[in-house]
Image: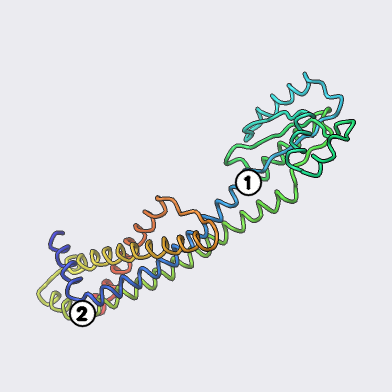
Amino acid sequence: MANSAKEAVAAFRRAPLLTSLSALMVGLALFVLGLFALATYNLQMALRTVEERVEVVAYLREDARPVDVEAGLQILRDLPGVEAVLYVSKERALERATTELPEIAESSSALEVNPFPASLEIRFAPGSRNEEAVEEVASAAEEFPYVEDVRYGREWVDRLFFLRQIGAITAITLGIAFAVVAALIIATAIRIAVYARKDEIYIMRLVGAKHGFIRRPFLLEGAMTGLLGGGLALLLTWGTHQLVFHFLFELDWVPVSWVLLGLAGGVFFGVLASSLAVHRYLREV
């Protein structure tokens, strides 16, 4: 293995231009994946932020008894996926309205009767903010006799979950497409490197070198090329993120796990493409 590593490094030194071009092609291919990952992650964060606002509000009748409301609170809190149930009194509802809506604040002093009903605000735990859980909780709240109305913005919630499904399908489809394109570009770059050293491979075959011995330096070279390309893609993606963040709009950077996965993906694609290119060439000779 040590000899194979030395041979891979020597190959880099013998053909620096070819190595640089191969790493550049790998880097540009992975840069496309990096941009896609950046966009996908920020789309996920945006949808998650909107999902955190999903809640069911049950408006109570004027004659609702405190003991019944307390019993309903406990029932709702025990439902699967429910994180918290908050009781909002009529006074608190009016206070919120005057704070959040200036037009109501201006006319609140002239109100003789508080028009806002008391309510129960039902919030969902992370991972349970889905259409089925929302509808189940809303149906349970509607069964209480002291509940006058239940609202959760059905159309808005349906569109939100539809957008999430569309986003997931689009992310998977485009991710696979970009990965295939990246693999093809990397395979082309490695194949050029293999054919540039065809005379060396031919001589090794003449002296009786086995396929495994011939293949190992190229696999290490492919891994090094993939790692260099991954590092280049990381720098380009980071630079793009900084430009967008400072001159267009705020953009979250991807998690460290995604960065490590991208670098590992570059090494994997480099090894795979190198293996396929060497295997094909050895069959031809």
Q: Of helix, strand and loop, which one carries label 2?
A: helix
Point out residue 26 in the picture as x, y percentages from the top left corner.
35, 69
Q: Quadrant of residue 67?
A: top right
Up/down of 198 relative to 234, above or below: below
Looking at the image, what colour scheme do you see?
Answer: rainbow
Residue neighbourhood size for the residue with mark 1, other residues' Cα within 10 Å, grouped as few (<14), some (14–19), many (≥20): many
Image position of 6 (left or right of 270): left
Amino acid type, mark 2: Lys
Please give the label number shown on residue 51: 1
Image position of 50 (left or right of 15): right
Point out residue 99 in the picture as x, y percentages from the top left corner.
73, 38
Point out residue 11 in the picture as x, y percentages from the top left corner.
18, 71
Point out residue 149 in the picture as x, y percentages from the top left corner.
82, 36
Please give the label number shown on residue 151: none
Residue nearest the viewer, comparing 285 with 235: 235
Image position of 124 (left or right of 172): right
What residue appears at the point 65 percent right and 43 percent down from the top-left corner? 53
Residue neighbourhood size for the residue with mark 2, other residues' Cα within 10 Å, grouped as few (<14), some (14–19), many (≥20): some
Label 2 and label 1: CA atoms lie apart by 57 Å
Residue nearest the viewer, comparing 28 with 211: 28
Of mark 2 and mark 1, the one earlier in the sequence is 1
Residue extending farthest right:
112
Residue nearest the viewer, comparing 105 with 200: 105
What residue appears at the point 43 percent right and 71 percent down from the top-left corner? 181
The quarter of the image holding the C terminus is bottom left
What residue appears at the point 20 percent right and 79 percent down from the top-left corner? 198
Q: Of helix, strand and loop, which one carries label 1?
A: helix
Q: Quadrant of residue 209?
A: bottom left
What residue appears at the point 39 percent right and 69 percent down from the top-left corner? 183
The residue indicated by pointer 2 is: 198
